[in-house]
Image: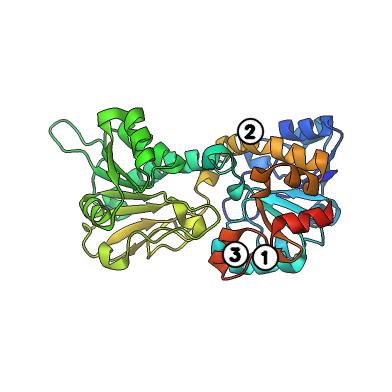
């Protein structure tokens, strides 16, 4: 199979779909890899390194989309990219279609086979290809929040870990999944007063066992969310419903009761965000203020640490890319129900229930489409 890797074009996105080491692995399995020139240049992954492992270099993205049987990316395709996709071509990347109706329409029109990293599952409802970026985003959310709390950034002028004789900042984390757990780890490490809220009693018990009395674990009810958000200096939104829009846990009315200069960091912004007032921002202009509350809603937060993020992502995605290339998409997805959950668009139709519900569409049954394609 010919696997293509275009350069990412979303603003300040420097990650790359395949590292030279990943390309080497695929070539070892008998496949061909075509990488757009300078795709990994910002990471120190040069065209020469790709050529040294046997990959070919494309002059531009058009050559990638024209020739590749499978396109491997990091971020969702931008309009100029989705218009280059073709019938039956495999697209393997993060999609987050619940928050991107125009992209969903573009993928359906292209009649491509779009497989989303973020909806592939594993045992115990894990999300193995979302997890590494959630880990990084969770840790970065605390860095971003701590910086934004500085008074010249619009924040309250509060230091997370404070100082002897000074109370630490209060951090409320909404969601105890991978991102929320990593945010808690970082905030506790900096000496903050940390509470985490989740609707799963089992998960709260697990977090209590992991962190002990250092972390306050709270059941997520409307009353408790209000209490802890109103008291917080930093609120981190880390709630995820796979494939679906994130629930709006903090309303605009609630912002009015929060302290002036409180910072909210919305890790769930790729899925629409879990604050009613959230809207995507960029690393160029990461914050805005609503009701005297500073919002940090950068949609590709891990892109700021692109080298670490690329390696972590490739560690997770490479086995799936290899399986797709070795078996073809139909057999690969028919053989593995967890992998099949990653199929979001095929045959001009939405094929994931939660994505379809978020977009107001009835999802097609993926098994029927795959069996016809096999």
Q: Position of residue 290 (x, y in %)?
A: 32, 65
Q: Is residue 96 above or below residue 41?
A: below
Q: Nearer the viewer, mark 3 or mark 2?
A: 3
Q: CA distance from mark 1 to mark 3?
A: 20 Å
State the mark number for residue 356: 3
Element class at badge 3: helix
Query: Which image quarter: residue 165?
Result: top left
Is the residue under label 3 in contact with that under label 1 (CB below 8 Å)? no
Q: Nearer the viewer, mark 2 or mark 1?
A: 2
212 vs 48, nearest the viewer: 212
Residue at the (38%, 47%) spot, across then down: 175
State the mark number for residue 79: 1
- Colour mapping: rainbow
Residue at the (32%, 32%) spot, across then down: 208
Q: CA distance from mark 2 to mark 1?
A: 28 Å
Is the residue under label 2 in contact with that under label 3 (CB below 8 Å)? no
Q: Position of residue 210 (x, y in %)?
A: 36, 29
């Amino acid at each position: 199979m010919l696997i293509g890797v275009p350069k990412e074009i979303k603003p300040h996105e420097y990650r790359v779909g395949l590292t030279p080491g990943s390309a080497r692995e695929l070539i070892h399995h008998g496949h061909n890899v075509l990488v757009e020139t300078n795709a990994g240049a910002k990471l120190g992954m040069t065209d020469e390194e790709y050529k040294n492992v046997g990959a070919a270099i494309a002059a531009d993205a058009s050559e990638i989309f024209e020739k590749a049987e499978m396109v491997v990316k990091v971020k969702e395709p931008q309009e100029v990219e989705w218009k280059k996709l073709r019938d039956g071509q495999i697209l393997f990347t993060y999609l987050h279609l619940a928050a991107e109706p125009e992209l969903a329409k573009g993928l359906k029109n292209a009649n491509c086979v779009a497989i989303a990293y973020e909806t592939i599952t594993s045992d115990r409802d894990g999300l193995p290809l979302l997890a590494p970026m959630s880990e990084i985003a969770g840790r970065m959310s605390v860095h971003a929040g701590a910086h934004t709390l500085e008074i010249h950034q619009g924040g309250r002028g509060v230091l997370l870990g404070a100082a002897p004789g000074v109370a630490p900042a209060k951090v409320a984390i909404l969601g105890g999944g991978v991102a929320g757990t990593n945010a808690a780890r970082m905030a506790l490490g900096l000496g903050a007063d940390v509470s985490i809220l989740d609707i799963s009693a089992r998960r709260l018990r697990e977090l209590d066992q992991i962190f002990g009395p250092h972390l306050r674990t709270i059941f997520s009810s409307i009353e408790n969310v209000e209490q802890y958000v109103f008291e917080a200096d930093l609120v981190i939104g880390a709630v995820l419903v796979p494939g679906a829009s994130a629930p709006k846990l903090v309303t605009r009315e609630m912002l009015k009761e929060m302290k002036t200069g409180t910072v909210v960091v919305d890790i769930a912004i790729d899925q629409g965000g879990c604050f009613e007032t959230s809207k995507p921002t960029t690393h160029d202009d990461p914050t805005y203020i609503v009701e005297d509350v500073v919002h940090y809603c950068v949609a590709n937060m891990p892109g700021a640490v692109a080298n670490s993020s690329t390696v972590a992502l490739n560690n997770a995605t490479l086995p799936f890319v290899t399986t797709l290339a070795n078996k073809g998409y139909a057999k690969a997805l028919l053989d593995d129900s967890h992998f099949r959950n990653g199929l979001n668009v095929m045959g001009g139709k939405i094929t994931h229930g939660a994505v379809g519900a978020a977009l107001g569409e009835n999802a097609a049954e993926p098994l029927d489409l795959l069996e016809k394609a096999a």
